[in-house]
Amino acid sequence: MSAPLNRVAVLGSDSAAWITAASLAKAFQHRKLDVVVVEHGATAAPPGRWTLPSQRGIHALLGIAEPDFVHRTGATYKLASEHVGWQGEGSGFVHAHGEIGSPLGGIHFYKYLVREWLAGRADPASNYSLAAAAALSGRFARPMGKDTALTASFTYGFHLGEESYAGYLRAHAVKLGVKRAVAPFAGVDRDGDGHALALRLSDGTALAADLFVDCTPEAPLMNASARVDWSTSLPCDRLLVARAPALANPPAMLRTTAARAGWRWRMPLAHETWVGYTYASAFITDDEARAELAAAEPLASAPLALAQFSSGRRSNLWDRNCVAIGPAAVQLEPLVGADLHAAQVGVSTLIELFPRDARGDAERIEYHRLMVEHLDSLRDFTLAHYIAGPARPGVFWEAVRAAPVPDRLAHKLDLFRANGRIELLDFESFEETDWAWLLLGAGCKPDALELSVVLYLEKFGSREAAPLRAQVHNLAESMPPHREYVRRLGELAARAPR
């Protein structure tokens, strides 16, 4: 006879743990699920994060008011990422959170850009994206209007300071009924079959639960289960982070720059700027990486943090009555800003498959199947930045390109090179337009375009595209500066009743 599942213990200290706990408490508030967070040492999360637009969705589900959140955490908006030098010196492209142009009947507008490119008339996708145009000009406004309007054709993520964001989420989770253990984690008690019974705290307390969620990089609850190693294809394993002064007009955009053994980044917040270097220690020493970052960012302080990670995912994502979410499930360089997104996908999938009995097998098997698809798709999109388009010279870059490419990614790239078609698999986090931003921007030129698309586009040319390009430019220029928008939002939040 199955026992009811009434108590969940979440192990972790960072934003992923508090998002997980708050989501569980909110989803099952009707049944008064008892959710407790047990903190485990200092957070291993990087001091600065950038997110995908899915962060907006989790905030809405948790009842987080955006003006208050932005004001209290010093966050800024993220309309796009700009990638400089990834395909060699002088190269660069933007990947915006939004559509490219307007649909041409049932065809994505980017197909028109591919046709023009093949005809020798290359036209950057950023010319037809309101999000990209606003990001490049340092402006921001939230989307508005009907779905078909150009002003509603984009979305956004956030730039965050981890310490302030985790603190904000912790306070919000407590309001939702999440409990916080009185002492940090010291160990786990198990039965003879390896099922977790209780978390032992540093004060000697044993905290019993029915289901355990591990949100820590060390994953002590996961019975030392093996990992699927991605480090051959994605060798970056270090993240060096430093503070720099706030920019005069910070763009709503992350900037990455290809470097000797990885890539540097710059992320603007409201009151400061975070800069960093994500690199592979097999190709550069930590001291050399510090020197390279200091030379590129002379106004930055001495590095505050050096995080180590190993790209890969856990081979068993739900082991007995323990579930791996966030950094316990997957470690991946932060290039595409998917760390918190992966945690959200994990907890939302757990909520959908929440078992009556934590020792049952059906939900556990399906959870693992779905999450493997999700996490492998994030790996593929990250890796595509390194191997799509012309090659960048350098020992590190040559090593990444020489490594075996996962079959699913190789097929996607081969198909695009053959006829410009982007094939999406089940449970991909990035949509067709996201892949178009990446592949067109990286210079991954197809040999041809699907015949049916060519025939459809016969009556659409540069004369028809010009008004759209002008409209994008004019709308972007009508937006307020990003800094001004954030300042006004802060004033609004400060006046709001608490």
Image (spheres, rainbow, N blue to C red):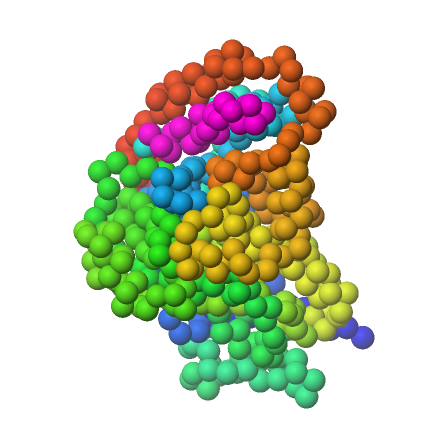
Q: Note whether 212 is above or below 296 in the view shown.
A: below
Looking at the image, residue 64 sits to the left or right of residue 361; the answer is: left
Residue lying farthest to the bottom in this orientation: 192
Instruction: Say which residue appears at 64% left-offset and 31% top-offset.
Output: 448
User: Which SS type dominates the magenta stretch?
Assistant: helix
Q: Residue 83: x and y, percent?
A: 41, 43
Q: Residue 287: x and y, percent?
A: 27, 68
Instruction: Say which residue appears at 53% left-offset and 21% top-offset.
Output: 149
Does any portion of residue 166 appear in the rendered image? no
| Image quarter of the N terminus | bottom right
Residue lying farthest to the left in this orientation: 299
Q: Residue 126: x and y, percent?
A: 45, 29
Looking at the image, residue 256 sits to the left or right of residue 150; the answer is: left
Front residue of 212/422: it is 422
Total marks shown come to 0
Q: Note whether 80 is above or below 226 in the view shown.
A: above
Does any portion of residue 91 appear in the rendered image? yes
Instruction: Say which residue appears at 40% left-offset and 40% top-offset.
Output: 91
Front residue of 163/262: it is 262
Q: Note whether 166 is above or below 392 in the view shown.
A: below
Question: Which residues fall within the magenta stretch?
Answer: 115-137
Front residue of 29/283: it is 283
Residue 466: within the magenta? no
Q: Residue 78: x and y, percent?
A: 40, 41
Instruction: Say which residue appears at 40% left-offset and 28% top-offset.
Output: 133
Residue 122: within the magenta? yes
Residue 359 lies in what quarter of the image? bottom right
| Image quarter of the C terminus | top left
